[in-house]
Image (cartoon, grey):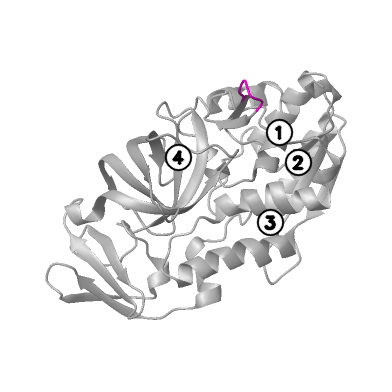
Amino acid sequence: MNINDKKIALLLSGGVDSSVVLYELVHQGLKPDCFYIKIGSEEEEEWDCSSEEDLEMATAVSYKYGCKLEVIDCHKEYWDQVTTYTINKVREGLTPNPDVMCNRLIKFGAFDMKRGHDYDLIATGHYAQTETDEEGRKWLCTSPDPVKDQTDFLAQIYDWQLKKALFPIGHMMKEEVREIAEREHLAPAHRRDSQGICFLGKINYNDYIRRYLGEQPGEVIELETGKTIGQHKGHWFHTIGQRKGMGLGGGPWFVIRKDIQNNIIYVSHGYDPQTAYRQDFLIRDFHSLNGQMPPKDITLKIRHTPDFLKARLTPKDDGQYVIHAEVPIHGVAPGQFCVIYDNRHHRCYGSGEITL
């Protein structure tokens, strides 16, 4: 059964990437059903300005190609599931990634429960690729655009979700996608890429955290001297390796350690102090995308950057893994996802949570 025989749902966000996905599918003679996932702010059911514009753009593009568009309300699922995950981790002093869990729980999760289960494939505008090996296993593979590659955001989706995933622009560079959008006069052609937390538009991350955990002033202490040099508004607003937003004079200052019980932030002064780096750390709860476990020689990411770092992976008896990086890594923080790739950073094996 080839793709022409499959029933395709397209998640249309109103941005340039998913709009070009629709063009690509139609250009191949396919006619997907389009869906716009509605989240909205927590307290209010009404739309904010950016959501209204997103839906207008999605409507214009789907109309252009004669495809129907349906709005799917995942408001409750997002605030119940993604927010619960995020706030629980932050409260523990960890560094979560809401966008990673949004893909698992909402785009390929709640949507599938509501409508996606009626479709063979779910297409999105992610910069990622897939391939099938000789034994029929589907792999998540990196995009040729290292800046836009989004495999790290997809590394927690389930095997059944990966099997249904379709990434029609994953083989392109961002510039190519923009050129297609302009050439085809797609409504979102000149829209800027969205920033911030998945689905939350202009909501600032600290504001998002503040509405649940509030503020809890505490001391900022210089690690080397033990001297109190300032105050913070709550350990949950800061992460290991952070350099900006500390509000301290005479910088740069780096967050080196957090004492969660006593709400103390420890910082170190100077440019890239060695205490801000780690070469060895643990990951737990490794999630394999297709049941295959990674080899010893790997590459990895601990945050969304174009860089893949070389490392060796050693399994422990308790199910955790020891990561030994080839070079020290800046800002390794508990709670971050460590995303594991083969040594050519082509195939993604999955990800685990960093624990020190």
**Mark number, residue 19:** 1
> Are the residues at dot 1 and dot 2 in contact (C-beta closer than 8 Å)?
yes
Q: Secondary structure at mark 1?
A: helix
Name which residue type carries label 3.
Cys
Q: Residues within 10 Å of mark 2 (few under 14, many from 20)?
A: many
Name which residue type carries label 2.
Ala
Q: Which residue is mark 3?
A: 49
**Mark number, residue 340:** 4
Q: Is residue 273 visible?
A: no
Residue 84's spot in the image, x, y percent?
Answer: 60, 67
> Are the residues at dot 4 and dot 1 in contact (C-beta closer than 8 Å)?
no
> Are the residues at dot 3 and dot 1 in contact (C-beta closer than 8 Å)?
no
In this view, 216 is above or below 299: below
In this view, 188 is above or below 332: above
Separation of marks 1 and 2 at Cα, in angstroms: 7 Å
Q: Residues within 10 Å of mark 3 (few under 14, many from 20)?
A: few
Sequence-wise first label, 3 or 2: 3
Q: Which residues are magenta?
A: 132-136
4 or 1: mark nearer the eye: 4
3 or 4: mark nearer the eye: 4
2 or 4: mark nearer the eye: 4
Q: Which residue is mark 2?
A: 58
Q: Secondary structure at mark 4?
A: strand
Sequence-wise first label, 2 or 4: 2
Name which residue type carries label 1.
Ser
Sequence-wise first label, 3 or 4: 3
Separation of marks 2 and 4 at Cα, in angstroms: 34 Å
Q: Quadrant of residue 85?
A: bottom right
Separation of marks 3 and 2 at Cα, in angstroms: 14 Å
Sequence-wise first label, 4 or 1: 1
Q: Secondary structure at mark 3?
A: helix
For image coordinates 88% across by 30% down, the residue present is 66
